[in-house]
Amino acid sequence: MVKKFLYFAYGSNMLTKRIHINNPTAEWKDIGLLKNFRLDFLTHSKRWGGCSATIVPTENYSVWGVVWELHECNMTTLDCQEGVADKLYFPLMVDVETPSGQIINCRVYQQCKDPDEHVKLRLLPNHRRPSPLYIETILKGAKENKLPTEYIKFLETIPHNKYSGEYNIGLPLNEI
């Protein structure tokens, strides 16, 4: 029997095409809410041309995302994609609540460095903003998986950095 694990995606891996690039065993399980964490952007990603998403422990905030079930063989590919060996992100286990109220324990990734200050995302300084393609990928994943409308509206308020260079995301841009 194949061992599996649950993974909570809140960034680009919410989009099915994106997670399947490196993790072909990923199967959609549900959407979920991670409580007492906030979404933020901090570390610049050469791949995406802007800052990538992270979660930061913060009381009374929450982050919506997608719960994927993956074969254990993809834990290594997921760790590699998230830059664990390079100390960009670290994995942790968190409780995620599904819309039906079920609490499930999932693997998630948090950047190793937390922002020095908590800034409302719509007011992010340019050096902490995601690229247009990255925020578009997050939004497509949120819409594809039918995250709550209010959360999608919140994501739509996040400004991008106006990056217009090349991307190295492993997928043709017309497929995003």
Image: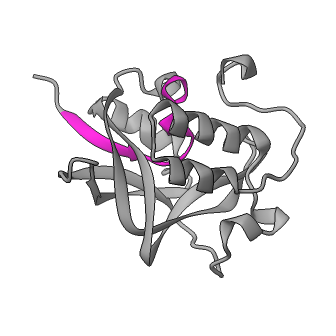
When asked about the image quadrant of residue 75, the answer is: top left
At x 9%, y 22%, the residue is: 1
Q: How many marks?
A: 0
In the rendered view, tell whether residue 120 sits above or below residue 91.
below
| Image quadrant occupied by the C terminus | top right
**Is 156 contained in the magenta span?**
no
Residue beneath the point at 52% across and 40% down: 142
Measured along the vertical axis of the image, is residue 140 above or below residue 87?
Answer: above
Q: Percent from the top left, x then y, of residue 64? A: 44, 52
Given residues 34 and 171, the one toward you in this image is: 34
Query: What percent of the width, then of the height, locates residue 113?
Result: 57, 70
Q: Where residue 50 sits in the image (x, y, percent)?
A: 76, 50
In the foreground, 48 or 118: 118
Write down the region rendered in magenta: 4-18
Judge from the rendering whether residue 99 lies leftward or rightward of residue 34; answer left or right: left
Name of the residue lying farthest toward the front: 149
- Which residue lies at the image location 36% right of the left edge and 31% below the top edge? 74
Q: Is-magenta flag for residue 10? A: yes
Up-down: is 8 above or below 30?
A: below
Q: Is residue 147 left or right of residue 131?
A: left
What's the residue at 52%, 53% (across, down)?
Answer: 151
Relative depth, front residue between 107 and 138: 138
Question: On screen, 29 above or below 8?
Answer: above
Q: What is the basis of the colouring in this image?
A: one colour
Relative horizontal placement of residue 115, taking residue 164 as reference (left or right): left
Q: Is residue 146 left or right of residue 69?
A: right
